[in-house]
Every structure is written in structure tokens, then in C-alpha cells.
Amino acid sequence: MPTPTEQPSPTPAATAAAETPVIEFQDVEKRFGDNVVLKDLDFTVGRGERVTLIGPSGSGKTTILRLVMTLEELTDGYIFVDGEPLTHEERDGRRVPVSKKHQKNLRTRIGMVFQQFNLFPNMTVLENIIEAPIHVLGRSKEEAVAKAHDLLEQVGLSDKADAHPTSLSGGQQQRVAIARALAMDPEILLLDEVTSALDPEVVGEVLNILRRVAETTDVTMLIVTHEMSFARDVSHKVMMFDGGHVVESGPPEKIFSEPDHDRTKAFLGAVLRDT
Amino acid sequence: MDWLDEQRANFEALGNFSDRILDGLITTVQLTVISGLLGFVIAVVLGLMAGSRSLWLRGPARVLIEFFRGISLLVLLFWLLYVLPLFWIKYDITLPAPQDNTFATATIALAINYGAYGAEAVRSALTSVPRGQWEATTALSMSWPHKMRRIIFPQAWALMIPSLTNLWVHLLKGSAIVSIVPEVNEFTFELDNLRRPTDIWFSHAFIGLATYFVLALILTLGMQALEARAKHKLGRGPSLWEILSPDPRPTPPDAASAAPPRTKAATTRPRAGKETE
């Protein structure tokens, strides 16, 4: 299981295609009532690949992350994690839900960092980080605490282990949330607009931590962000979404410098002018 | 003056029966505490079921909540004590009969009646825990019992205490209705028993008024302490110790009381001066 303390590994994007994809979307459709958010969505993410989803708000980017985290149920199609069905599978030509146990087993390989941090206010910073490793993964307390202190050091909050989340600033809370997600040793890390709720002056420090995680681990990342320079730095692939469809996708140098589609040009023009 | 003297005599006469009043008081406290705790258990179980996404849990919970919320406590007691025993007679049921232990029957009646109200408080507190908290527990793959016990319920607890306090005070006062139950000689029953032969109203009614008020006050203060503690654990508000200690800061009281006016004067004076210039 990769941890940020391991040695840097070479970019895996090139080799990823040959193996089983870590995430695979097959004809995924998501509707909220009559509102179709995603339609006929097919894409794969290779092991260790870092993919950034960009596009205007309401284009379904966040929904994709929430589908992978099983926070939303997809209305049609299939999602595979490590080649195994996450929510539904096809059996005798019919689409049937997978067992809860199977889903839970797959879900422990996925971690998520939220826009609003969502730290548990009834626990200290350290307790937030060790809770799931101890009670979900069955680690010993000593092991979990040692790992938590390691992670806190990496996010620059060694002195805050016994603090309450409510006493921390937004940027500090988000760094704890990153440590909490990494404490589970996820294969897949979902980052859902992790800097959107932060004050501009602390955005940089949070992004730098994530850059370092990207450099020092081979955890697969699916990222939704409005920070285009961050997307350019860390991703192997950028996917441009609009209206529930992939408009175009490719390496960041290509998408940011010479996009094929007018829609992408217009979006990037508007976003980059703001920053 | 005559009236006042008379009242003093009445209170003294009532004082002669203080042991009976005390017995009644103890029974009332027992009723309130036991059915309060039992009602809380019922409220949590029904509240968790009613807040569940599964129809198999939510459906029965809703039926039970609506049913026991909707029926009068008096009618419920009447049913338990006079209608249900008919089944015992007819079918020769081996379980203990409700009329044989009237205290237990009265306790259960209070518990299910107020437990049904409490279930709504529990359910709404659970739904008031921010969605992000639920989602974070899913993202960390926590099981349902685990997330409830460690994350969701501790946060809902702080939210449900005020409603539960209300209901508990209600239950305390509502327990007076149990005076109609044979052999449960609670406070109102004893007081009424002492009043009836003498037909003296003021002293008896006054004792009744004051006692229920003081009991309710104790209950409320205790629950407020619990609420402060629960909120402090969520990082909101001072700890109970900080609330109860007069002034935990090292500043001597003299300096503390003298300092604020001085700084106030220092800041307001120049401003006032500017305005007049």
C-alpha cells in the first residue's frame, strides 16, 4: 500500500494502459429525477494515474467523484474498481446490485477529501485520523497513532494532534482531512474542490501538500479543481466536461495550451482570466 | 391576620403528615426517573428506526410513534389496567398481569407515551447532523453501528437534549395523572388524600405547586449541565468546569472589575473629544 513516505516512483501513465484499470466507467448514467447529470459516460483511470476533471459548474464533475465514493447511486451502467463491480454487476444478462460486504471491501481502497473538510467535531485531530484505521482496518492503536503523527508532520501540523478541529483555521482543517484520508492507505484518492472553501492565502499550502503527495506516492488521484496551475502540475490527464459529457481529454500540456474544442477554449479563457 | 394565622396552623398540621408526603414525593421521583430512562431507550430505538432509509424499519416505527403519540395517557392507563386484564382472565396468560403490579404498569404507560414523543426529537436531531458528517463516515468505510455510536449520535445528542428536557419535565408533571392508578401513591395522590377530609385548600395546593416547580427546576438544571458538556465536546462553548467555577483566570477579582471601565474610558474619551472639536 503506498504511503507518502515511500520513495518517488516514475510516472505510471504509460504502463497503466496495459494493466487492469483502477477505475472504469461503463455506460454510466446518473439522473436526479428528470435531470440527467451524466450520460453514456465511459472512461478508465490507470494505476497511479492522476486525472483532473475540469469544466463549468453543474457539468457533473463532482457527481463522478461521489459515484466512485458510493455517496450517490448511479442510475444505469457500471463502475469497476480494480476490475471488480462497485455497485452493480451483470448476471444472466441482468443488472443486479453487488453485496454490501463486497462493496464495503472495495470502498476501503478509496479515500476522499471534501470541499468542506467534514472533520468530526466530537474528536481531537489525532482521534479523527486514527478512528477509521483502528476500527475499520483493525490496526493496533500504537500503529495507527505512529502513522497519524507521521502524517501530521507531513502536513505541518505536528503540534495540533490534541487540538479540536473547531479551533483550527480552514486551511489547517483541510490539511488534517488530507492526513485522515491518507491514514487509510487508499489506492484511490478523490479530491473534491479541496481548496474552494479556503481563504486565498492558504490555498497554496494545501496544494503544495497535495503536490508532495503526488510526487512521493503512486496513489491514483481523481481531482476536481478550479486551480488550473495545480491541475497542470500534478495531472497525467485532464478531462474537460460539459453537460454530462467528456468534451475532450488529453495530457495537461495539450489541453491547456492547444485545446481542440471551442468549448474548452472558452472555458479556459474564462477561468484563466480570473486567476 | 386571622387568615394568615389559620394558614400557619394548616401548614403545621400538614407538617405532621410529612412522612406520607415524603413517601408520595419519592414515588413521584421514582416514576419520573424510571419511566424517563425507559422512555429514552424507547425514543432512541424508535428514533433510529424512523430515521432509517429502510422501509422495513421506518414503517413500523412510524406506526408505533403515531399510535402512542395520538392516544391519551389517561385512556392508555385505563386500557392497561382494566381492559387488558380481561384477556388474562379469558386466556389464562401466564405472564404477570398488569393489575398485579400497578407501579410497573404506570411506569410503562408513561414510558411508551413519552418515548413516542421523544422518538421524534431523536429522529429530527439525527437528521440535523450535517450531511457532510454522514458522507465522511461513508468515505472512511465505517459500519452503521460504528458511525452511529462514535460520530453521528454524539453530535445528535447535543441537539436533542433541549427537546428531551422539555419532555422529561412534561413527564414529571404528567405523572400526577397516575394518582388514579390504584396502589401507586405518588405525590399528588397523597396530597389529595390529606386535603379531602379537611377540605383545606391553600396549604396543600401551595405545597403541590412549589414541589413540582422545584423538581422541574432540578431536572432542567441537570439537563442544562448535560447539554453544556455535550456542546463542549463538540468544541462549542466552555466546559462545565469553566461554567461552574466563578473565575478560573488568574486575574484577581478587583483588577478584573476595575480594568474594563478604565479601558472603555480611555477609548471613548478621545473619540468624544474629536466629535466636539
Image (cartoon, coloured by chain):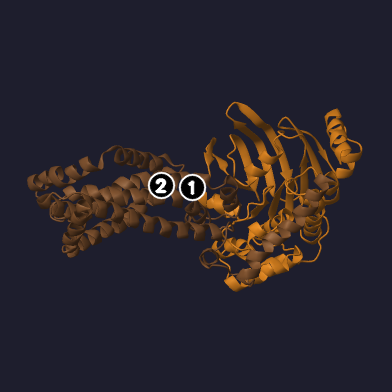
Q: Position of residue B88 (x, y in %)?
A: 11, 48
How far apart, in angstroms, are the residues tagged by discs 1 and 2? Answer: 8 Å
User: Position of A92 compared to A227: left or right?
Assistant: left
Q: Position of residue A243 (x, y in %)?
A: 72, 29
User: Depth check: A108 or B20 in front?
Assistant: B20
User: Position of A135 compared to A149: left or right?
Assistant: left
Q: Which chain does brown denote in the image? A: B
Q: Residue furthest front?
A: B1
Amino acid type of the residue tagged 2 in the rendering: Gly
Q: Colour of chain A?
A: orange
Query: Disc 2: which chain?
Result: B
Query: Disc 1: which chain?
Result: B
Residue displayed at 17% across by 47% down: B180
Q: Position of residue A140 (x, y in %)?
A: 57, 71
User: Position of A96 compared to B266: left or right?
Assistant: left
Amino acid type of the residue tagged 1 in the rendering: Leu
Residue displayed at 76% across by 64% down: A156
Kind of element beneath mark 1: helix
Report if the CB atoms under discs 1 and 2 are less than 8 Å apart. Answer: yes
Q: Which residue is mark 1?
A: B126
Q: Residue furthest right?
A: A257
Mark 2 Cα within 10 Å, few/some/many (few <14, many 20+)?
many
Q: Which residue is mark 2?
A: B47
User: Position of B56 compared to A82: left or right?
Assistant: left
User: Depth check: A61 or B208 in front?
Assistant: B208
Precedes in sequence: disc 1 or disc 2: 2
Residue displayed at 55% across by 60% down: B232
Screen quadrant of the N terminus of chain A: bottom right
Q: Position of residue A13 (x, y in %)?
A: 81, 51
